[in-house]
């Protein structure tokens, strides 16, 4: 257990620094990968899937996300010179999520990937859909259909990343074929609900 927690902490530190460096880069698609949720969904889902128990899934994911948040905002303040006060507020908010929503997400994924049936598949569809909740894929659809306002920036790389992560969580991580099938069938409606939920969350977060 201790070794797994240390590994999760090390991965969190590296990921947080890399994410903030990417987020602050001049390369737009790297900045997207560093700030949109798909990468974090994949990281926590993989930790949960690899965990040997519910306890390990919750603990490693919480440690990973907490250390990652500290590294992310620490890099922003210490290296990039961003404002301390605003970043401390953001860090506090994400630390609360790291100790509550993140381990809950990991436990749910850990259990659902090991079970067969409609309920686990439905749960995994919801988990996978978080990677599609950034509206980048929806913007591409609107652009293709002529419904996007002129000048709206597109994020095609992030849209593809979201789709890949969602398909991995829903279609690769489940151990049982029936669970996998249900998760994939429900992925689109789950993505709609997840988008609304993520919009609400970002509306509550400071900054």
Image (cartoon, rainbow, N blue to C red):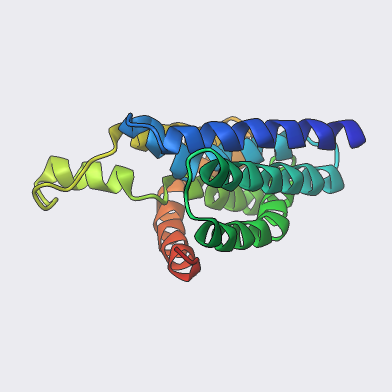
Give the residue furthest to the right: 2
Is residue 32 visible in this depiction of the protein?
A: yes
What residue do we see at 69% from left, 31% from top? 11
Q: Quadrant of the N terminus?
A: top right
Q: Position of residue 9 (x, y in %)?
A: 75, 37
What residue do we see at 46% from left, 54% from top? 190
Q: Position of residue 171 (x, y in %)?
A: 55, 33
What residue do we see at 58% from left, 34% from top? 17
Q: Residue 200: which quarter of the image?
A: bottom left
- Asked if residue 193 is positioned above or below residue 66 in the image, the reply reads below
Number of callouts in the render? 0
Q: Residue 4: which quarter of the image?
A: top right
Q: Position of residue 116 (x, y in %)?
A: 70, 43
Instruction: Report the front residue among 53 and 74.
Output: 74
Give the residue furthest to the bottom: 204
Instruction: Report the front residue among 191 and 33.
Output: 33
What residue do we see at 9% from left, 46% from top? 146
Q: Is residue 90 left or right of 48 when viewed as pictured?
A: left
Q: Position of residue 180 (x, y in %)?
A: 58, 37
Is residue 174 visible in this depiction of the protein?
A: no
Instruction: Report the front residue among 55 and 2.
Output: 2
Q: Quadrant of the C terminus?
A: bottom left
């Amino acid at each position: 257990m201790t070794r797994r927690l240390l590994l999760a902490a090390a991965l969190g530190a590296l990921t947080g620094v890399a994410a903030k460096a990417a987020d602050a880069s001049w390369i737009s698609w790297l900045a997207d990968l560093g700030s949109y949720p798909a990468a974090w969904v994949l990281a926590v889902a993989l930790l949960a899937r690899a965990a040997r128990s519910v306890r390990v899934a919750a603990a490693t994911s919480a440690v990973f996300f907490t250390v990652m948040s500290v590294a992310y905002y620490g890099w922003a303040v210490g290296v990039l010179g961003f404002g301390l006060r605003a970043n401390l507020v953001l860090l506090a908010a994400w630390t609360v999520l790291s100790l509550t929503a993140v381990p809950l997400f990991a436990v749910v994924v850990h259990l659902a990937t090991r079970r067969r049936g409609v309920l686990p598949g439905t749960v995994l569809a919801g988990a996978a859909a978080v990677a599609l909740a950034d509206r980048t894929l929806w913007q591409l659809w609107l652009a293709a259909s002529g419904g996007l306002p002129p000048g709206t920036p597109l994020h095609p790389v992030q849209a593809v990343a979201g789709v890949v992560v969602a398909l991995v969580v829903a279609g690769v991580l489940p151990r049982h074929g029936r669970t996998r099938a249900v998760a994939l069938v429900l992925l689109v409606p789950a993505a709609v609900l997840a988008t609304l939920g993520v919009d609400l969350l970002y509306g509550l977060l400071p900054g």
